[in-house]
Amino acid sequence: MNEILPVATIRTQVTVPLRFPDGYATTARVFSFDGLVDGREHLAFGLGDRSGSPDGYPAGGSAPLVRPHSECLTGDVFGSQRCDCGPQLREAVERISAAGGFLLYLRQEGRGIGLYAKLDAYALQDAGLDTYEANLALGRDEDERDYAAAAQMLAALGVERCALLTNNPDKEEQLTRLGLTVTERVPTGVYLSPVNAGYLAAKVSRAAHGLDLPFVCRQAGT
Ligand SMILES: Nc1nc2c(ncn2[C@@H]2O[C@H](COP(=O)(O)OP(=O)(O)OP(=O)(O)O)[C@@H](O)[C@H]2O)c(=O)[nH]1
Ligand SMILES: [Zn+2]
């Protein structure tokens, strides 16, 4: 690690069969941890051939595929169309199961401001603010997430280098600064819904997300 981080350790690991509403099924090795810096109950889901490996590496030696996924109760569990979190999570589980690696399920609801505040931000968005302006209007930062606990989790899993499944450059920058070697950034799919175009456009224009949204960006730029 480049920055000095306390060492976290694996607390418990259990096997959990997963089945999604569309019928897709896989098996995860689910890890909990002791010693995470923010005291939150983050989980790692080991998926695919590498999940059983204590150091996260396959026999072949290629870097595991890792997605740090921030909690979104409304999107991940209830299928909210206001964001793209649900389909990204579903995609990540299948892709990591195929490639081998870990999904880090990070308890950073609402980009770190919490669930109630996210709903307050939604109300402000309904009044015309974009997703980042709404956080600021609430007296919060645009994005309050830090990935120190994620770095600790990967270290505990023995992952020193990985391919990172994300469109968010901040995840790569923070984790790299924390000592992780990111061999490549792998983009997720683009999940437009009837109501999330503005949200996705703001991620591109305000936070440099690597989403290919030319039509939406032109709209947002007006
Ligand atoms: N404050 C706030 N949070 C939101 C809003 N919409 C979604 N979120 C949160 O944004 C986070 C999205 O997490 P991720 O999908 O892991 O990350 P990302 O920054 O979109 O980057 P990717 O890795 O490319 O998906 C979740 O914590 C959601 O709860 C919003 O309008 N306001
Ligand atoms: Zn969401």
Image (cartoon, rainbow, N blue to C red):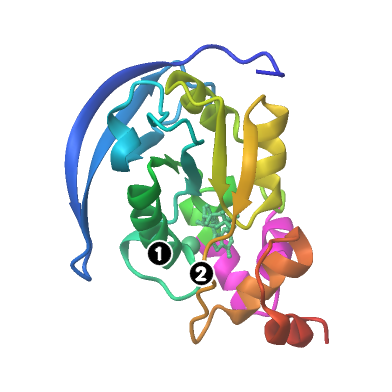
Asked if the residue at label 2 sits under 8 Å from ligand 2, the reply is: yes
- Name the residue located 72 percent from the left edge and 49 percent from the top edge: 141
In whole angstroms, how far apart are the C-alphas of marks 2 and 1? Answer: 8 Å
Q: Secondary structure at mark 2?
A: loop
* Image label count: 2
Q: Nearer the viewer, residue 183 or 156?
A: 183
Residue at the location (32% across, 66% down)?
A: 78
Dots 2, 1 in contact, CB < 8 A? yes
Give the quarter of the image for residue 178. Answer: top right
Residue receiving disc 1: 86
Tag 1, which secondary structure?
helix
> Which quadrant does the N terminus fall into?
top right
Residue type at tag 1: Gly
**Residue 152 visible from this viewpoint:** yes
**Magenta span:** 119-140
Q: Is residue 144 visible?
A: no
Percent position (x, y) of residue 91? 40, 61
Residue 133 belongs to the span the image colors magenta: yes
* Residue drawn at the location 57% of the way across and 30% of the way down: 161
Q: Residues within 10 Å of mark 2 (few under 14, many from 20)?
A: many
Name the outermost residue toward the front.
Answer: 60
List x then y, in percent, for residue 98. Answer: 34, 51
Relative to residue 166, is residue 219 depicted above or below?
below
* Crowding at mark 1 (Cα within 10 Å: few <14, some 14-19, many 20+): many
x 46%, y 15%: residue: 8
Give how far across and how far down residue 95 sits, in percent.
39, 55
Q: Is residue 159 above or below residue 76?
A: above
When asked about the image quadrant of residue 146, the answer is top right
Quarter occupied by the C terminus: bottom right
The disc label shown at residue 64, or none: none
Q: Which residue is mark 2?
A: 83
